[in-house]
Amino acid sequence: MDKYQLVIVLESKYYIHFDMYVNGVLTNPQHPICMNKGEFDRFFKMLFRGSKGNCIRMYSHSPPTQFYP
C-alpha cells in the first residue's frame, strides 16, 4: 500500500502550495503544486480514503522565501 505525504509549503488566502511525497519520494521536484483550498481538501480526502488512512497532511518547517505571502 502506498503512503502519501502532502507537505504544505505556503498557505495564502485562496491557494495552497504543497509538495507531494509517495513512499518517501518527491513527485514534483521542479515546483510545488498549487491548488485552491477547496480542491486541496477534496484531493486530501480522496487520497486518504483511497489509501485507507496512509495519507498525512503536514506543514513544512522551512518554507521557501521566493513565494509571496
Image (tube, rainbow, N blue to C red):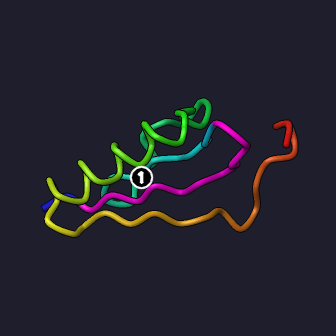
Total numbered labels: 1
Placement of the N terminus among the 4 image quadrants: bottom left
- Residue sitting at 60 percent across and 42 percent down? 16
Image coordinates of residue 2 in percent, x first then y, are: 20, 58
Q: Regarding mark 1 in the picture, which secondary structure is present there?
A: strand
Residue drawn where x is 63% and y is 37% of the image: 15
Residue picked out by circle 1: 21
Q: Is residue 22 above or below residue 57?
A: above
Residue 13 is covered by the magenta coloring: yes
Q: What percent of the width, then of the height, locates residue 52?
A: 14, 65
| Quadrant the C terminus occupies | top right
Magenta-colored span: 3-14
Q: Residue at x 14, y 53 (%)?
A: 50
Q: Quadrant of residue 33?
A: top right
Residue at coordinates 59% horizontally, 30% vertically from top-left?
Answer: 30
Q: Amino acid at mark 1?
A: Tyr
Mark 1 burial class by Cα count in 10 Å: few <14, some 14-19, many 20+: some
Main secondary structure along the magenta-highlighted residues: strand
- Asked whether 16 falls inside the magenta stretch, the response is no
Q: Is residue 68 left or right of residue 17?
A: right
17 displayed left or right of 41:
right
Q: Position of residue 61 (x, y in %)?
A: 71, 68
